[in-house]
Amino acid sequence: QVQLVESGGGVVQPGGSLRLSCTASGFTFRSYGMHWVRQAPGKGLEWVAHVWYDETTKYYADSVEGRFIISRENSKNMLYLQMNSLTAEDTAVYYCAKPLATNYFESWGQGALVTVSS
Amino acid sequence: EIVLTQSPATLSLSPGERASLSCRASQSVGSHLAWYQQKPGQAPRLLIYDAFNRATGIPARFSGSGSGTDFTLTISSLEPEDFAVYHCQQRREWPITFGQGTRLEIK
């Protein structure tokens, strides 16, 4: 079955950088666009970024545009999120998500907690 | 961006009762709306997509309706495991957006 496992979360100082990884299995990873979605403590869900199956197109939320970069390595079934210039507002659990054929989120990882604090 | 407003923020009901949760969009999303259930410490689970289609494995007591700007998630008879937070999400246009969530709690 589909499995998504995030890693790379942790505590980082304001202005710092962090890279999240998502290891995918149980489906043909190279055939699917993938997403990152985050959830700040006690808050709702916020879509963060999307990358097409072939990495030719990427979309970002305005809140992260210019600071975060989504990428993938299809040969390794890996999805990444490079996060730069982090602020306290980026503190959240970050989920990688596989969509249904369209952009609804059918499968989710367990999440990686990112805490931005001095 | 399309803003989704969910109401009520909190809904207090008893097992066996019927629940109706609302999601209103700031502009038409057609039928491009989904509902998710989230329990504490867990990732969300897709319940309904394209306004009324149940995702794989979702019980028939969950149903979705609506189109355009007004949508409803109905749980016909609440089971103890249904008490959770529910989120709506639109995919009509970028950026993808979510509502702020409705907490369904046991009365």
Image: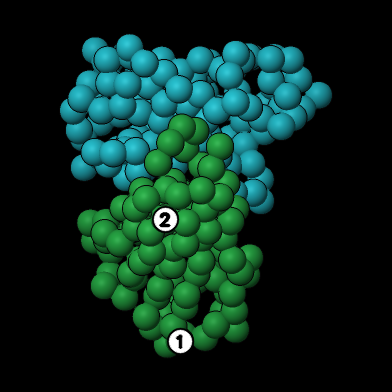
Chain colours: A cyan, B green
Q: Chain of mark 1?
A: B
**Which of pointers 2 and 1 lies earlier in the amino acid sequence?**
1
Q: In the picture provided, is A101 more to the left or to the right than B29?
A: left
Q: Amino acid at mark 1?
A: Glu
Quarter of the view holding residue A33? top left
Q: Quadrant of the N terminus of chain B?
A: top right
Question: Which residue is the site of mark 1?
Answer: B17
Q: Could you tell me which secondary element the residue under label 1 belongs to? A: loop
- What residue is at 42 percent from the left and 87 percent from the top? B16
Report the front residue among B6 and A110. B6
Instruction: Give the CA separation, mark 2 to mark 1.
Output: 28 Å
Residue A103 lies left or right of residue B8; in this view the side is left
Helix, strand, or loop for circle 2?
A: loop
Q: Which residue is at a point 60% across and 26% down the rendered structure image?
A: A62
Residue where numbered disc 2 is placed: B68
Which quadrant holds the C terminus of chain B? bottom right
Q: Tell me residue A76's x, y (percent).
A: 28, 15
Residue at x 32% of width, y 21% of height? A52
Q: Which x, y percent locates residue B69?
A: 47, 56
| Disc on res. B102 | none
Is residue A86 visible in this depiction of the protein? Answer: yes
